[in-house]
């Protein structure tokens, strides 16, 4: 029985046949020739039989036993075929092309090259899979890439770079170009370096960036002369956007930052000062004219540049400071022109204008300058420049305290809603943070607050507490502790008065016979007031004695010191035409009550009877005899009071009102308040120095001064000379001592 031959048996017979080198190479060459024909665009293709034949031949030539294993010869043949095709077909075609045509031909030839390598890898698959590893030689795909790089790319890359840059320049001038072509060429640079950036950076990018710098140098030199600042910035913004778009479409992503930096440098950095300082359209002009959109563009352009926005911020600061100084000068001029500005309205106008300026430029900071902290700092420093100048000899600290007083007291300002008042208080507190002498503000504010609270002139207790909470948040608890204590004292007055009334009801003998209200203040919270041993009239003395008895029984360990200058009385003045209720101070009431015992008193007799100092008595008598309401007639009749004057009750006095308030002439105690602030500063410096030295034990002179200035600057700007003087005083008082070996070093004495 015989078995008919099969395909398998034929295959075995084929495999057993050895293929000579010449015969095998001839077969391989035919296949390679056909691939070249196809790559050149001829209408040819591989049939299945041809493909199998070529693959099988190469396979067999690689798997034959030595010495008929022709793997090395085929590997060399592969490289020879690639190089031959490049030299014969690719290079001649590229030499004939220039500019964009060169790029298109290169794109085409690279695509064909990759296709040829792809086909060859299929035919030489067995060689690539086994021989490469065994022989430790480059893979066929790498050989193909290397051939193209060494023979083609290295030959034409200079011309290619020039062609690409020329197309980019055309696009910058408004021409349309083939972006997909450029993208493919850019990819070629990277593929030639096996994914690395070596060729892209060295052969293309550096040249492209140099050309970019030259291009925008030419543009900028023309625009800076012809265009206004807004026009120039608009062009710069457009150029940057186009370059960014260009980079995203056909350049490598790593080029974007370098490209934009180059454009920014040529358009913005080089001409920063010239652009921002353009006389009629630069930064200051834009701020002056409120050009929001242009300022926003300026920030957008310069915030990407190192130190760019610092320059804009500095100009912003200078502009705001200059405008603020103009406001200061206007207020000073108004203050000196009394005919047009009586009643201190210039003070209110200055503060209002400062508010308006702050609102105006805060809109710039938040809107145009993206709420950047650099511009917040610039605005703060600008306001510090003019807010610490003062107006016509009056410090901004005092002006702000006066403005608060006008806002918070009854009838002091126009009717404002709670929201408006809160907004106003926010603005006041913000300006307080800009002044260096915050302790001066605190002293003036405390004085004004005391008068509002003691004389019932505060419009709303909630508003008083609100501004204290805002000041506390900005300046710390120590800043507002005394003021908060003052408000708390007044909140306890009603409760204390109820207890007093209850005491009188339970003790009829203690009833003074007049309505008496006493406000108890905590020493240390309130400003210092001059105390006087006033000889009270009997009617008033009874009320004082009754309260003393009540308070002694209630609190045995507290001492009352009476400040009669702060008191207020209501008297019924019985005149011939009608009875008028008079509201006046305790000193005034004491003087008028004397006229119940005699219609005529001399100056010296009144002084002896009441035990009043001359300056107080002159003010009191002037208020009731020389001012608007002449309750007393004075001899001789004049507008001032002297020690030889005689006073008589004016029974003919009348007024259309049934109730009138007789004010005392104001006392200018600013000098005294400034002196008190100076005294408090000495104590603050002493305390600060001792805190520092107690913590450090030993410290050199310069470091002690620096730390002291840093800590005290939150409340006031300390003078270095004053600190040195306080150090010497502390040494004298044995709190500190100098090191014997190094006199520049101090020690704390425990």
Image: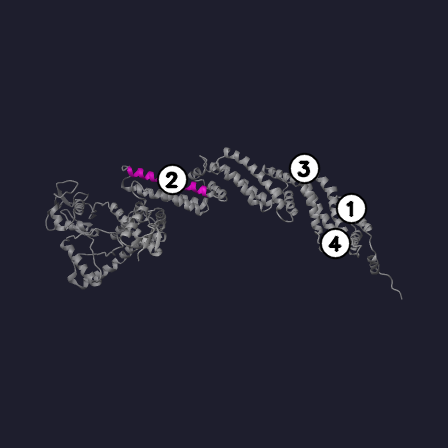
Magenta-colored stretch includes residue 488: no
Nearer the camera: disc 2 or disc 3: 3
Which one is closest to the eye, mark 3 or mark 4? Answer: 4
* Image position, residue 640 (x, y; %): 16, 41
Residue 573 location, x and y as percent? 16, 49
How many marks overall?
4
Q: Residue at x 16, y 61 (%)?
A: 510
Residue 239, position in %: x, y? Answer: 55, 40
Most common SS among magenta residues? helix
Circle 2 or circle 4, nearest the eye: 4
- Do the numbered discs 1 and 3 sit on residues whose CB atoms are within 8 Å? no
Whole-angstrom CA distance, mark 1 to mark 3, is: 29 Å
Identify the mark at residue 323; answer none if there is no mark. 2
Residue under pointer 3: 98
Q: Quickly name the residue at label 1.
A: 33
Give 220 or 567, whichever is nearer the viewer. Answer: 220
Q: Secondary structure at mark 2?
A: helix
The CA distance from mark 1 to mark 4 is 20 Å
Q: Earlier in the sequence, mark 1 or mark 4?
A: 1
Query: What segment carries the magenta color?
Result: 310-336
- Say which of marks 2 and 1 sits in front: 1
């Amino acid at each position: 029985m015989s078995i008919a031959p099969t395909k398998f048996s034929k295959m075995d017979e084929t495999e057993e046949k050895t293929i000579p080198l010449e015969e095998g190479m001839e077969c391989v060459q035919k296949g390679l020739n056909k691939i070249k024909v196809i790559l050149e665009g001829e209408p040819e293709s591989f049939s299945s039989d041809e493909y199998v034949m070529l693959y099988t031949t190469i396979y067999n030539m690689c798997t034959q036993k030595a010495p008929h294993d022709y793997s090395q010869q085929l590997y060399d043949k592969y490289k020879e075929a690639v190089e031959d095709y490049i030299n014969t077909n690719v290079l001649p075609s590229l030499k004939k092309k220039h500019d964009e045509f060169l790029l298109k031909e290169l794109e085409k030839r690279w695509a064909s090259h990759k296709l040829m390598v792809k086909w060859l890898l299929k035919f030489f698959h067995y060689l690539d899979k086994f021989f490469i590893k065994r022989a430790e030689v480059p893979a066929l795909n790498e050989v193909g890439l290397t051939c193209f790089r060494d023979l083609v790319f290295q030959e034409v890359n200079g011309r290619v770079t020039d062609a690409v840059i020329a197309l980019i320049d055309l696009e910058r001038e408004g021409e349309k170009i083939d972006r997909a072509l450029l993208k493919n060429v850019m990819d070629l640079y990277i593929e030639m370096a096996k994914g690395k950036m070596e060729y892209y950076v060295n052969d293309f990018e550096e040249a492209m960036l140099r050309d970019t710098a030259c291009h925008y140098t030419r543009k900028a030199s023309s625009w800076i002369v012809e265009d206004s600042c807004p026009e120039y910035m608009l062009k710069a913004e457009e150029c940057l956007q186009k370059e960014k778009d260009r980079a995203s479409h056909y350049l490598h992503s790593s080029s974007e930052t370098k490209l934009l930096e180059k454009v920014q440098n040529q358009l913005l950095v080089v001409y920063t000062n010239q652009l921002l300082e353009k006389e009629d359209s630069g930064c200051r002009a834009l701020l002056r004219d409120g050009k929001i959109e242009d300022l926003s563009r300026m920030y957008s352009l310069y915030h990407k540049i190192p130190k760019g926005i610092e320059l804009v911020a500095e100009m912003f600061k200078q502009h705001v400071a200059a405008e603020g100084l103009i406001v200061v000068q206007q207020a000073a001029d108004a203050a000196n022109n009394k005919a047009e500005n009586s009643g201190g309205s210039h003070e209110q106008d200055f503060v209002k204008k400062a508010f308006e300026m702050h609102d105006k430029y805060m809109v710039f900071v938040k809107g145009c300058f993206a709420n950047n902290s650099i511009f917040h700092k610039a605005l703060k420093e600008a306001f510090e420049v003019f807010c610490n100048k003062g107006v016509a000899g009056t410090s901004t600290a005092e002006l702000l305290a006066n403005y608060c007083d006008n806002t918070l007291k009854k009838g002091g300002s126009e009717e404002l809603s709670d929201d408006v008042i809160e907004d106003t208080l926010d603005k006041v507190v913000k300006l307080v943070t800009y002044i260096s002498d915050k302790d001066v503000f605190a002293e003036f504010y405390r004085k004004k607050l005391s008068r509002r609270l003691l004389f019932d002139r505060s419009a709303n207790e909630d508003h008083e507490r609100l501004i204290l909470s805002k000041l506390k948040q900005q300046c710390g608890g120590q800043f507002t502790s005394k003021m908060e204590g003052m408000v708390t004292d007044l909140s306890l007055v009603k409760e204390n008065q109820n207890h007093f009334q209850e005491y009188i009801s339970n003790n009829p003998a203690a009833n003074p016979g007049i309505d008496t209200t006493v406000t108890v203040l905590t020493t240390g919270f309130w400003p210092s007031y001059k105390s006087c041993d006033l000889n009270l009239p009997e009617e008033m003395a009874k009320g004082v004695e009754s309260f003393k008895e009540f308070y002694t029984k209630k609190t045995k360990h507290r001492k009352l010191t009476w400040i009669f200058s702060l008191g207020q009385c209501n008297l019924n003045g019985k005149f011939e035409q009608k009875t008028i209720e008079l509201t006046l101070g305790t000193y005034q009431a004491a003087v008028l009550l004397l006229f119940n015992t005699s219609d005529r008193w001399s100056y010296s007799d009144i002084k002896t009877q009441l035990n009043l100092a001359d300056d107080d008595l002159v003010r009191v008598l002037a208020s009731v005899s020389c001012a608007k309401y002449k309750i007393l007639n004075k001899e001789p009749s004049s507008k001032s009071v002297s020690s030889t004057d005689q006073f008589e009750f004016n029974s003919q006095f009348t007024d259309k009102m049934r109730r009138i308030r007789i004010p005392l002439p104001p006392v200018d105690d600013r000098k005294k308040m400034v002196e008190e602030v100076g005294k408090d500063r000495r104590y603050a410096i002493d305390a600060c120095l001792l805190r520092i030295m107690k913590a450090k034990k030993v410290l050199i002179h310069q470091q002690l001064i620096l730390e002291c200035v840093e800590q005290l600057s939150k409340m006031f700007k300390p003078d270095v000379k004053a600190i040195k003087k306080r150090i010497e005083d502390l040494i004298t008082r044995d709190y500190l001592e100098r090191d014997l070996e190094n006199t520049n070093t101090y020690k704390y004495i425990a």
